[in-house]
Amino acid sequence: MTRHDTVKAYIDEASVEAVLFTRNSNIQWFFEGEVEPRIDTSTDMGAFWLLITSSMVIALCPNYDVHRIRDEILPKDVEVLGFDGFSNSVESAGRLCDKFSKVAVDSDLFFPSSSYVSIGRDFYEKTQLLSEREILRLRVTGKLTENIICEFAPELQPGMTELEVEKVLRAIFIESGLEVPTLCIASDERISKSPYPVSTVKKISRYLMLRATIRKQGLSVSLSRYFHFGAIPQEIEQRHERASGIAAKGAVAIMRARTMGEVYEEIKNAYASLNAANEIAYYSPGGTTGYTQNTFLFAPDSQITMKHPATYVLNPLIGGLLSEDTVLLNSDGNAEFLTLGEDFPKVKVRLESFRVHRPWIMII
């Protein structure tokens, strides 16, 4: 099924005549990441918009950008219509959409109006499914991300600041053709203060944590990794064993569960087995990822169906430590850690008939 077929099916199900995409994430999804709709990467509003019906796909953009978008960005079978100035985009798109009795749109720019409805949850559930080309891209991005971290690790030294580490590592990711929406470096006592420990000028002493979300052509992977200078104290090892065990049980649950709520319950039980049942309420243990992150979370009573092939971020937090990776649930129902390569130290967690590898602490 093509992406246009998916939209056409949604048009029928939602009883609308057209769909209007204004957000980069939805436009990138429609073209499987092969089209770049952005000029300003700090916003999710596209440089052009897509109006899609059952029979046509039309790109709407300012007149000054028509030739670039037509000649350099879009496939030849997509018609491009221009309007005078981006400030008139809502008005111009509105005139075109007035030809339809009802249009589903992904932005509140067109509300309030009886002619527009929000794109519903059912549509975003459909967008979780990945093509073979997208799966290949995610595998490459995931392995490349961890490889870069492993190759950079020998450069880490006590006395470096968290910001110095972030600056160099961010530059390496960018030079490798990757985007870096999130990169947090924390050290020593700061590691357990927050799941998003934004890098500071603090100097690193013995213990280091890295958390990153890396994007390539619209699709993202996320991971966290830990490092220690010299022998690892037993207390730190025990805390990582607890986090690894919960993440391993979460990975098995992703393979077995029918809904995201069922995954949550299995992870909740894993917390309870460690006498830490209350900690799951502190931070979500994960959710969907893809062109948008966390559209759906592993949450109590969630009836969102587990999709395959699709990707999920698994990031349980216990005792201030994360065990985070991106998981691909394949078409055959098996789970694959996209961000876990060959070189980073690992531990093997045994669960019934499963042997689940989780990243350990790299000693430097």
Image (tube, grey):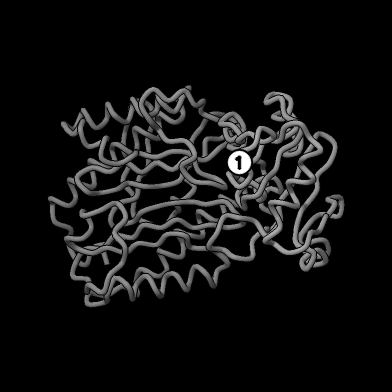
At horizontal 40% and vertical 70% (from top left) the residue drawn is 152
Q: Nearer the viewer, residue 359 or 317?
A: 317
Query: In which quadrant of the rendered image does the N terminus lie?
Result: top right
9 on left or right of 363: right
Task: Point out residue 234 in the picture as x, y percentages from the top left corner.
Answer: 13, 51
State which quadrant residue 207 falls in.
bottom left
Q: Nearer the viewer, residue 319 or 359?
A: 319
State which quadrant residue 140 falls in.
bottom right
At horizontal 71% and vertical 24% (from top left) the residue drawn is 15
306 on left or right of 237: right
Provide the residue designation for mark 1: 111
Q: Is residue 198 above or below residue 312?
A: below
95 on left or right of 292: right
Q: Nearer the viewer, residue 224 or 71?
A: 71
Type of amino acid at the residue the image marks with label 1:
Phe
Query: In which quadrant of the rendered image does the C terminus lie?
Result: bottom left
At horizontal 21% and vertical 53% (from top left) the residue drawn is 192
